[in-house]
Amino acid sequence: MQTFFIVAILFLGFLITFQIAKTSEYVSVLKGEEKSRRQSNRINAFLLLAFLIIGLFGVYYCNEVFKGRLLYVSASYQGESIDKMMWITTAITGFVFIITHIALFWFAFKYQESDKRKAYFFPHSTKLEVIWTVVPSITLTIMIGFGLYYWFKITGEAPKNAMVVEVTGSQFQWDFRYPGPDKVLGKKYYKDINPAANNPLGQVWDDPANHDDIHATGEVHVVVNKPVKFIIGSKDVIHDVGLVHFRMKMDAVPGTPTTMWFTPKYTTKQMKEITGNPDFVYEISCDQMCGKGHWSMRGVVIVETQEEFDTWMFSQKPQYYVAFPDKDPSNPAYKPDSTAAGNAAISTGNNKAKTRQ
Ligand SMILES: [Cu+2]
């Protein structure tokens, strides 16, 4: 019903405009072509001026209304530089926008057709062309330069003390893998992917480095004030890890690992206080249209203290034990394994070099 009314209103609006146009045509015939042209010129000049004033007021009004709805403060240190860049870009482009629009509409009004003057023929000026080519080029190059600088920082080498989390996108969920005590992510092979056999990421069980890797779905835990490096991949199509609160994002491409690192600044608990929202959570959105369930591809980042993280990590069971419960020492059915792979299951970083040979 609503659609019908909207269509009807639009149609009536069109009809009225058409009729007015037709009437003014008849009027101009009656009044004489020349006089009516001058009159419509004057009306247009005033309309352009009105458009400028209403338009600029609209820009100001929108800013006032939406000011409070912007994202909160950046939740990562790196995001602060991204925000700074955004404000500088907004200031420069905003300034240029206002100046050029005032000039555009004011000139159209001021220099409307008049008997007292004649238009000056001004076909070309090399000097002007050079100025308006060189100035924006230099400005944009500087802005892009800063962008590249931060981009290389975020996608480059992570600090030595960074924790590593592997993030894998698939239609339509996020999987996370922690390297475990040995700090090495075990090898993966896409043909080993078998969710029915508790191997959703295709971990190669023959690789001992896999035996302590922790797998989690939907929620990723990270530590406040500690750099975290995401190694990102995909099992099917291109997804994108969008961390809007941290001002980070990176494509998840099948077959080509991508990385990014950042340092969370506030725990989830602190952010609940900052935002005044007791239900606040850091979200991972998929920022790449990836299929019909794209909208539902939501993950959660839990930023916590080192102690809280350790407690959580301690409660996690390596995916190897999930896939092979009889290898789990905490399982009553545990069968000690004498093979190298079995021994490595309970090994830590100390003998990593030996088992990875
Ligand atoms: Cu996706």
Image: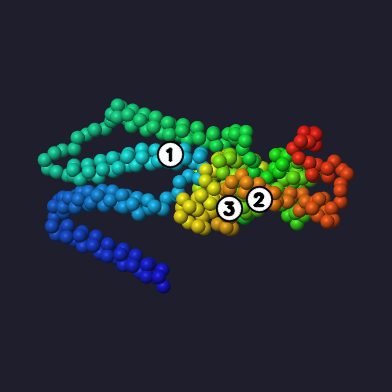
Residue at which label 1 appears? 84
Dot in front, 2 or 3: 2
Give the amino acid at mark 1: Lys
Give the amino acid at mark 3: Val
Measure how far apart labels 3 and 1 are at the Cα level: 26 Å
Q: How many marks?
A: 3
* Residue drawn at x 13%, y 57% as measured from the top left: 31
* Residue drawn at x 41%, y 33% as measured from the top left: 140
Query: In this image, 242 relative to 135: left or right?
Result: right
Q: Position of residue 185 (x, y in %)?
A: 71, 41
* Residue drawn at x 77%, y 33% as measured from the top left: 353
Residue at which label 3 appears? 300
Give the amino acid at mark 2: Trp
Categorize mark 3 by other alpha carbons within 10 Å: few (<14), some (14-19), many (20+).
some
* Mark 3 residue's CB less than 8 Å from ligand 1: no
Quadrant assignment, res 163? top right
